[in-house]
């Protein structure tokens, strides 16, 4: 069974896991447009996404880690199909349902099951923390997702981190759900209100060290002005520390194998 990731930009990817096709964190703003991040904060996009909603294949689900303008924007709101299951946080579900989307809010460790013929895809919501200390109450709640596809053989497990900081308790992801075949890690060293709110290169390397996925694909690192830690930071950490993973970088519009 083939498992691939196509990178559209920011944290937006097409995951093709066996017979299932999933879209993550749909962000289709064009270069020069601004994303609204809440609390009067905006950030300008520096890159061009490789696809727009009209270019997408048929989807089995959309995975949304949290409701921020660089993860679900006004283009997604206007043009994405309303009837595709949209798996997200309970906080995001309420607003998305008002907008007409088929949103399903998932508390931490909740599961959703997708079925295609003899294949099953289990989506598990896993914890994340978007900001340190009391500042976490300023930003929207965030989740990661573990996707486990099973066609009767050995399950294949992918962790999409969402916009979380590295925390030691993320060890629970593998303790509860098992070893990871692949991890899609959100980087960028995003700074908001003077605080680090997504992993920089060092924290991303710490998470790889903690969870030891067989394959790691970095995303979310150069698309907006609030991103302060380029991909080169993470690659340097990975080389220096000889991280226990096979690192695969991917350009916008390109596809890489997760196996």
Image (cartoon, rainbow, N blue to C red):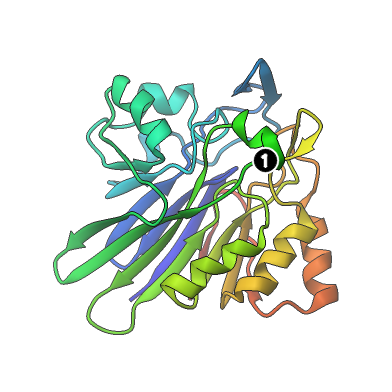
Residue 102 position, x and y percent, is 25, 34
Residue plotted at (48% across, 43% down): 65
Residue plotted at (77% across, 70% down): 238
Q: Is residue 258 visible?
A: no
Is residue 248 rendered to the left or right of residue 96? Answer: right
Q: Residues within 10 Å of mark 1 (few under 14, many from 20)?
A: many
Instruction: Count the marks.
Output: 1
Q: Is residue 98 or residue 169 the one in the foreground?
A: 169
Q: Is residue 201 or residue 256 the one in the foreground?
A: 201
Q: Is residue 205 visible?
A: yes
Above or below residue 39? Residue 86 is below
State the SS at label 1: loop
Q: Quick one: which residue is furthest to the front in this view?
A: 134
Q: Look at mark 1 in the image and give the residue it sits on.
A: 131
Residue 81 position, x and y percent, is 28, 32
Residue 93 position, x and y percent, is 35, 32
Is residue 187 rendered to the left or right of residue 255? Answer: right
Is residue 91 rendered to the left or right of residue 101? Answer: right
Above or below residue 249? Residue 83 is above
Q: Quick one: which residue is furthest to the bottom in this view?
A: 153
Is residue 82 rendered to the left or right of residue 194? Answer: left
**In which image quadrant can residue 202 be found?**
bottom right
Which of the image's four quarters has the N terminus?
Answer: bottom left
Residue 135 position, x and y percent, is 69, 33
Above or below residue 54? Residue 244 is below
Residue plotted at (27% across, 84% down): 153
Residue plotted at (58% across, 68% down): 171
Q: Quick one: which residue is furthest to the left in this view?
A: 117
**In which image quadrant can residue 156 be found?**
bottom left
**In which image quadrant can residue 70 be found?**
top right
């Amino acid at each position: 069974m083939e498992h691939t990731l196509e990178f559209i930009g920011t944290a937006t990817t097409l995951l093709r896991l066996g017979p299932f096709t999933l879209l993550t964190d749909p962000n289709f703003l064009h270069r020069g447009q601004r994303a609204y991040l809440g609390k009067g904060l905006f950030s300008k996009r520096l890159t061009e996404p490789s696809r727009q909603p009209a270019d997408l294949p048929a989807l089995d689900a959309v995975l949304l880690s949290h409701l921020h303008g660089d993860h679900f924007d006004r283009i997604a709101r206007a043009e994405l199909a309303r009837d595709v299951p949209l798996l997200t946080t309970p906080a995001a579900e309420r607003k998305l349902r008002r907008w007409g989307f088929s949103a399903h809010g998932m508390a931490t460790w909740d599961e959703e099951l997708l079925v295609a013929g003899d294949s099953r895809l289990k989506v598990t919501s896993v914890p994340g923390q978007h900001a340190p200390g009391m500042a976490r109450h300023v930003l929207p709640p965030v989740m990661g997702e573990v996707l486990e596809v099973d066609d009767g053989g050995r399950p294949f497990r992918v962790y999409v981190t969402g916009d979380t900081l590295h925390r030691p308790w993320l060890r629970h992801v593998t303790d509860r759900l098992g070893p990871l075949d692949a991890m899609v890690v959100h980087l960028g060293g995003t700074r908001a209100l003077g605080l680090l709110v997504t992993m920089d290169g060092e924290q991303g390397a710490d998470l790889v060290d903690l969870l030891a996925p067989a394959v790691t694909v970095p995303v979310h690192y150069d698309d907006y002005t609030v991103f302060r830690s380029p991909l080169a930071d993470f690659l340097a950490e990975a080389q220096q520390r000889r991280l226990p993973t096979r690192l695969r970088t991917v350009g916008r519009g390109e596809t890489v194998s997760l196996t």
